[in-house]
Image (cartoon, coloured by chain):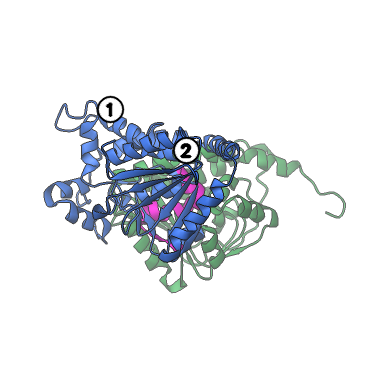
Amino acid sequence: MDITIKNWVGVIEVDDFSPLSRGDAAFATELRNAVVDLSDDDFVKVIVLRARGDFAPFQPAPDPGASVIFTEWSRNFAGAAALYQSMTFSKKVILTEVAGECAGAGSLLVLSSDLTVAASDARFASPFADHPEANFVLAALTIRLNRAKAWLIRDYGIDAAQADAFGLVNRVVDRDDLSTTALDMAASAALMPLDGVVMTKMLQQAVLDASGVGREFDMASFYSAGLLVSHGETNE
Amino acid sequence: MSESRVTLDLDRESHIARITLRRPEAGNAIDAQMAAAICVYLDEVESEDDIKVVVLSGEGDHLSTGWDAEEVWRQYLDAPGGSIRKHPSQRARLVALDENWWGPKGLYSRLLKCRKVTILEAKGDCLETGLYFALCCDLVVASHDARFGNPRWRNIGADGDLSLLIALVGLKRAKDLMFLGLNWSAQDALAYGLIDWTGSSADRGAKVEELAIMCASIMRDGIVSEKYAVFASLAKMGIDLSFAATTVVSASLSNIHFQPGEYNFLRELRSEGVESALESSRGNRVEMR
């Protein structure tokens, strides 16, 4: 994981974010720590999450394991100090730069970020089937309730053009232009005073609180437990 | 009322009231006195049982270019505790923001919770205050030349309610305005759900009239029942909480510390004047650490 800071913009670059999809706790913790450190850095206004290849190629998601759902798994993936809440409630602007396949936890990173620029070949899989920590309230606030329900129930992929129309991404560009566009957007957001960035995020938090985003993250362990005890009937 | 920059026309026969901003020479920039006048007119409209619909519009090319830049500081000085020292007290800022804009008696709360159907006729610049008119009215008719945004946010941070914006256009789309300083065309605004209709300038007035007449044909009890159902939903959405948070954050943002190299709108306003400050604040500034 490479981290650079220049002109108020912190960039976190990895090969891809698929380790999150396969439940890699060490990766999640390292990424969380990087996000928190940059969020606390007075010389950073915008944090960019970048993959060197496709954003998050598919990886099968393992069951968390019943004995750790409410403890270790929650602390690593869903809890207040875990990665996704650290991103959602960061006091800095977080921008995701998405090319190619964005499966499972990749879409959750997109939902937890403020801004997203996507390459025209980006495809966003539903995070809900395999990731109990996926936040439905964030999805409903972002792409609207009817689309979020369809994404959850039908488990379909959203291409870049649809993502733009749905409001899941802010901009779609050619893959060759992705990094340049992301940095241009980051530079634009960084024109806001540092105090303004922090207070804008705090004001947004009032909306997220009223909408129950934090409570939805709290429910993740229960959703996970429900998945473990559920079983298919004949022919299901 | 001595405020002539806002007028009210009541047509009881058609059941339609019209509140018109009449400050075209300043792009209908809004100050606290104009906001208060609109609130007084909304009170008057609500006391008239024969009025069912209020149309809000502006004279000239623009609905509103925003908050009067020269007023930004004065409203704090005029509030209780505002002129005791060189800089207005924090309580003066809170009181001004609450009473003029976000509190129960403020412009946006009054417009959002008007018991009549509110229709906005949008054109040209619909910035800052103009954007909030669109967010708070029931129906928005805009001609193709309309553009919606809040360029001031880039100078200090988002100092306006975010809950309505997010509810209307979505969480990530809202950040086009919050963090990227973009203005949306009428076409974009229609696609995102901010407005209800767009068309040519020539057709705009007729569309407003059509909607106003249609709404005025609804029975009085029906309109007020529907509006109270909306108010209940707004309460569940936490709009009052968000407006209160906006007052607090906005007061804090009026008092922020700038880092070296960051653009300071008020400093430029004081040293270079309104035109220069507005041009810099709405232009493509590039600043590097």
Q: Specify the segment rendered in magenta.
A: B163-187
Q: Tag 2: Cα neighbours inside 10 Å, few (<14), some, or many (≥20)?
A: many
Q: Mark 2 points at which residue?
A: B114
**Of label 1 and label 2, which has the lower sequence position?**
1
Q: What element carries label 1?
A: helix
Asked if the magenta segment contains residue B84, the reply would be: no
Q: Check the rendered structure and report the hue given to chain A.
A: green
Image coordinates of residue A70 in percent, x first then y, are 62, 36
Question: Residue B9: percent from the left, percent from the top?
Answer: 39, 44
Q: On what subunit does the disc labeled 2 rest?
A: B
Tell me which amino acid carries mark 2. Cys
| Residue B100 vertical placement versus B70 (above, below) | above
Tell me which corner region of the image, top left, top right, bottom left or bottom right, holds residue B143.
bottom left
Answer with the quarter of the image where residue A223 lies.
Answer: top right
Task: Tell me the chain of label 1.
Answer: B
Of all residues, the one furthest to the right in this rendering is: A234
In which quadrant is the N terminus of chain A drawn?
bottom left
Please give the label number shown on residue B64. none
Which chain did the renderer colour blue? Answer: B
Residue B153 sits above or below residue B247 on the image = below
* Residue B255 locus on image (x, y percent): 25, 37
Residue position marked by numbered label 1 in the rendering: B91
In the rendered image, which quarter contains the C terminus of chain A?
Answer: bottom right
Is residue B61 visible from the viewing direction of this image? yes
